[in-house]
Amino acid sequence: MQVWECLWVERRTERGHTRRVVEETPPGVDELNSCFIHIEYEGRPVLVVLLARDGSINRMGNGTVNPEIDDTWYIGKVEEPLFDQLMMAVPNDILEHAGAYDPADRRGIECKCMIVFGHEDGRATQFEISYGSESEGPPLELQTIIRRAVELTDPWWKAQPNEANLLRLGKPKPWRFGKPHRPT
């Protein structure tokens, strides 16, 4: 596993919001090799997606707060160039706007969105947005990236063995993030 480093500088925006920004101008989208997306609602992860150039794929949830949704964290590898397809939705200049945004006008339940782009040289460029469920969410460009990541990983995620099918077949439950598996 690669460790990414990211250098941050805190700045205040014109509206008085706190914003952390990358200290140096990051390289372009063509130098990226992974994208990690993590969305929380009231401190609970509701969507986690990882796509990498080597075909690695991870997915948990669909971004909604629904107890009926499978919250198993699935990890795998695919042949399809899903990461490259995701990068087509990433504007070349978006990395210049990386940082942490914490708007003062949040309303509703606490939500967080984090998108981390891994670079070929081991560095990372991170977006971290805190917002309320009743206020403006992540910027439109980041929403587009999230929607595209979900769209690209949906067929793979839905094809994963779900708990009900495994129990019917007499196989152990899939591993759950934060919940230890105890064989029956």
Image: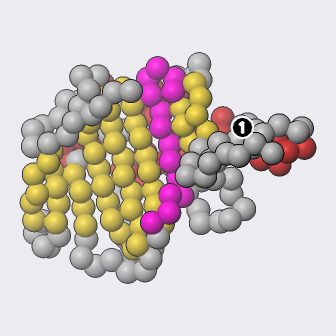
Magenta stretch secondary structure, dominant: strand
Viewer-side residue, 45 vs 23: 45
Q: Is residue 46 within the magenta segment?
A: yes
Q: Is residue 55 within the magenta segment?
A: yes
For the N terminus, the quadrant is: top left
Viewer-side residue, 163 vs 11: 163
Tell me where residue 62 appears, x and y as whole percent. Answer: 59, 53
Task: Name the residue rendered at 44%, 23% in the picture.
Answer: 53
Local SS, label 1? loop
Mark 1 crowdedness (10 Å alpha carbons): few <14, some 14-19, many ≥20 = some
Task: Name the residue rendered at 33%, 37% in the picture.
Answer: 117
| Residue located beneath label 1 in the image | 160
Location of residue 84 by image quarter? top left
Tell me where residue 173 appears, x and y as whole percent. Answer: 75, 43
* 15 lies above or below 54: below
Image: magenta residue range: 43-56
Tell me where residue 91 appears, x and y as whole percent. Answer: 32, 39
Q: Is residue 89 left or right of residue 9?
A: right
Tell me where residue 116 appears, x and y as whole percent. Answer: 34, 42
* 45 lies above or below 27: below
The residue type indicated by label 1 comes to Gln
The structure's colour scheme is secondary structure
Residue 161 seen in this snapshot: yes
